[in-house]
Image (cartoon, helix red, strand yellow):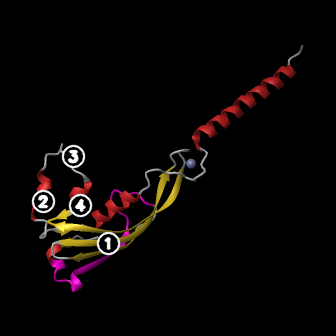
């Protein structure tokens, strides 16, 4: 995905550029390429960015730790302010905590907009915090308890059959 040179956008038809997405995004592990569309419109003092995209990711169930695949989709719109001072955030000391929102919501009017990075952020935000393979997933505790019972049982029965073999 190419970066969009923001001044160029003002000369585009309807001051809009549409980007077709069909690729994997750096830093985002997906099973299928991310497919969708990003639309960037120059509105004078801000950019209106909207995007629809989807892919499939591998999640790990919070309860049973099994992996499962899940569809990940975004359909979102965001306002990104054009501000000459936007670049100043780059000179902040590294230790200073800067919220992701603060970094992405402002760009310089003579700079670039990076559709790939924007979409990456949106996809990350869409990843479910609570991952469950199934709403009724019994979880790992039940499974462990069940299997350890079986182990005890089989040992027990082995012991029983051994006992029978021993001469009295
Ligand atoms: Zn599970």
Say left or right for 77 vs 89.
Answer: right
Q: Mark 4 or mark 2, which is nearer the start of the sequence? A: 2
**Helix, strand or loop for disc 3:** loop
Quadrant of the image containing the N terminus: bottom left
Relative height, residue 33 to residue 98 (above, below): below
Does the residue at mark 2 contact the one at mark 4 (Cβ under 8 Å)? no
As displayed, is residue 79 above or below residue 8?
Answer: above
Q: Which of marks 2 and 3 is nearer the N terminus?
A: 2
Region of the chain picked out in magenta, as a range: 8-30
Whether pointer 1 and pointer 3 mark residues with C-beta atoms closer than 8 Å, the reply is no
Tag 4 residue = 104
Say whether marks 4 and 1 touch (CB < 8 Å).
Answer: no
Residue positioned 31% across, 72% down in the render: 50
Return the residue at label 3.
97
Residue 16 is covered by the magenta coloring: yes
Local secondary structure at mark 2: helix
Q: Is mark 2 within 8 Å of ligand 1?
A: no
Measure the alpha-carbon separation of dots 4 and 1. Answer: 14 Å
Q: Which residue is drawn at 47% across and 50% down?
A: 130
- Neighbor class of circle 3 (other Cα within 10 Å; few <14, some 14-19, many 20+) is few
- CA separation in Å, label 3 and label 4: 14 Å
Alpha-carbon span between mark 2 and mark 3 = 16 Å
Q: Would you say the residues marked 2 and 3 are in contact, meaning their CB atoms lie under 8 Å apart?
A: no
Which residue in the structure is indicated by mark 2? 87
The quarter of the picture where residue 46 lies is bottom left
Residue 54 in the image: state x and y as whole percent: 43, 67
- Rendered residue at 29%/64% (across/down): 118
Query: How far is mark 2 from mark 4, CA to CA?
Result: 11 Å
User: In the picture, which quadrant includes the C terminus?
Assistant: top right
Q: Any mark on residue 36, and which?
A: none
């Amino acid at each position: 995905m190419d970066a969009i040179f923001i001044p160029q956008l003002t000369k585009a038809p309807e001051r809009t550029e549409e980007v077709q997405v069909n690729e994997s995004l750096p830093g985002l592990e997906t099973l299928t390429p991310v497919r969708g569309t990003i639309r960037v419109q120059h509105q004078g003092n801000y950019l209106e960015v909207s995007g629809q995209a989807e892919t499939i990711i591998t999640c790990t169930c919070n309860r049973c730790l099994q992996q499962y695949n899940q569809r990940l989709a975004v359909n979102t719109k965001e306002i990104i302010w054009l501000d000459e001072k936007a670049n100043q955030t780059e000179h902040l000391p590294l230790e200073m905590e800067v919220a992701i929102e603060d970094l992405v919501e402002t760009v310089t009017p003579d700079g670039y907009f990076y559709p790939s990075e924007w979409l990456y952020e949106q996809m990350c935000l869409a990843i479910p915090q609570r991952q469950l393979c199934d709403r009724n997933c019994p979880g790992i505790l039940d499974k462990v308890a069940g299997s350890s019972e079986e182990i005890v049982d089989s040992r027990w029965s082995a012991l029983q059959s051994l006992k029978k073999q021993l001469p009295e």
